Image (cartoon, rainbow, N blue to C red):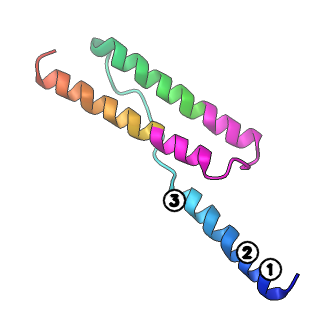
Amino acid sequence: MSKKSFVLGVALASTALFGCATMAQDRPFVDIGWHHGNLHNAQENIVAAYEYIQQAQRANDGQLACHAARAKQLLAEASEELRMAADVANSEGH
């Protein structure tokens, strides 16, 4: 392998790792009260799924590429959307 190929490979790998790291979102948490039971339960399941993905990442020594990081990002976004849904319900007197 030539030096140029090696440097190119290292640069591409570094870019991929940096891209995955920047996908990281804040960990979702349950902040919807029991007044909205179904939304609360859904948010609990999101938190559990996020934790399972983290366990899978550790068990696979980071071999899940950016897919696990993207799944965690989407779960964090889903948790935020549920929070906004509960806020709308609260504002409408439900």
* Secondary structure at numbered mark 1: helix
Q: Which residue is mark 2?
A: 10
Q: Is residue 22 above or below residue 7?
A: above
At 41% from the left and 25% from the top, the residue drawn is 43
Q: Quadrant of residue 59?
A: top right
Residue 63, position as x, y percentages in the image = 74, 49
Span highlighted in magenta in the image:
52-74
Q: Nearer the viewer, residue 32 or 11?
A: 11
Is residue 73 in the magenta section? yes
Q: Amino acid at mark 2?
A: Val
Front position among marks 1 and 3: 1
At 17% from the left and 22% from the top, the residue drawn is 90
Q: Which residue is mark 3?
A: 22
**Side (left or right) of 50 relative to 61:** left
Gap between marks 2 and 3 measured at Cα:
18 Å
Q: Quadrant of residue 60?
A: top right
Question: Quick one: label 2 or label 3, which is nearer the N terminus?
Answer: 2
Q: Quadrant of the N terminus?
A: bottom right
Residue 74, position as x, y percentages in the image = 46, 41
Q: Quadrant of residue 30?
A: top left
Q: Amino acid at mark 3?
A: Thr
Main SS of the magenta segment?
helix
Q: Which residue is mark 1?
A: 6
* Secondary structure at numbered mark 2: helix
**Side (left or right) of 94 relative to 74:** left
Q: Amino acid at mark 1?
A: Phe
